[in-house]
Image (cartoon, rainbow, N blue to C red):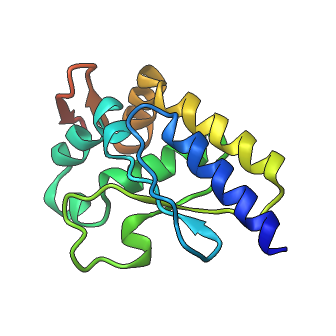
Amino acid sequence: MVAAFQERRDRVVQMLNEIPGVHCAMPKGAFYVFPNVGGVCERLGLIAAHAALPAEARARTSPSKLLQRFLLERYGVATMDRNSFGRIGVEGEHYLRLSIASALDRIETGIRRIDAASRDVDGCADFLRAELGVAETARGTATATA
């Protein structure tokens, strides 16, 4: 069983690190990986969209939380954003938590979907408009429309 989890971990970290804008360090244990998705948040306009939210809404979310929702609602991939597993010292950090406690083929499918989502600038802009009332442009500027 330990060998199976090591194989999954190694494959997941490799695949995540192949996605532009993602960096994932090799965890030493547990059933989770914690990729830094800051580059993806920047490319998709999530940092600008978050900044454009009204203060009250901005306090309840983060760029990585917006990415988490986009992945779930538009790509069917369940992750946890950084704030969901602790808020101390996370300002400006954009991490997700992914479980590797599933079959490798299912995990690989999920990571391929994350890769596709990370390149879907237009789909993310549509998500931001529909879900949050935020108009985002490819240049990374955003305005709240609601």
**Residue at image coords 30%, 57%:** 62
User: x, y (%) of residue 52?
Assistant: 17, 43
Quarter of image, res 125: top left
Task: Check the picture and name the quadrant holding the C terminus.
Answer: top left
Q: Residue 145, position in %: x, y?
A: 24, 35
Q: Quadrant of residue 9?
A: bottom right
Q: Position of residue 122 (x, y in %)?
A: 43, 20
Q: Is residue 17 left or right of residue 6?
A: left
Position of residue 56 measured from the top left corner of the image (x, y, whole percent): 19, 64
- Does residue 145 appear to the left or right of 15 in the view shown? left
Q: Observer-nearest residue: 145 or 66?
A: 66
- In the figure, 53 relative to 75: above or below? below
**Residue name at image x 59 percent, y 76 percent:** 29
Q: Residue at x 27, y 29 (%)?
A: 135
| Residue nearest the viewer, comparing 107 with 76 | 107
Q: Quadrant of the N terminus?
A: bottom right
User: Which residue occupies the extreme front position in the image?
Assistant: 3
On screen, residue 64 above or below 3: above
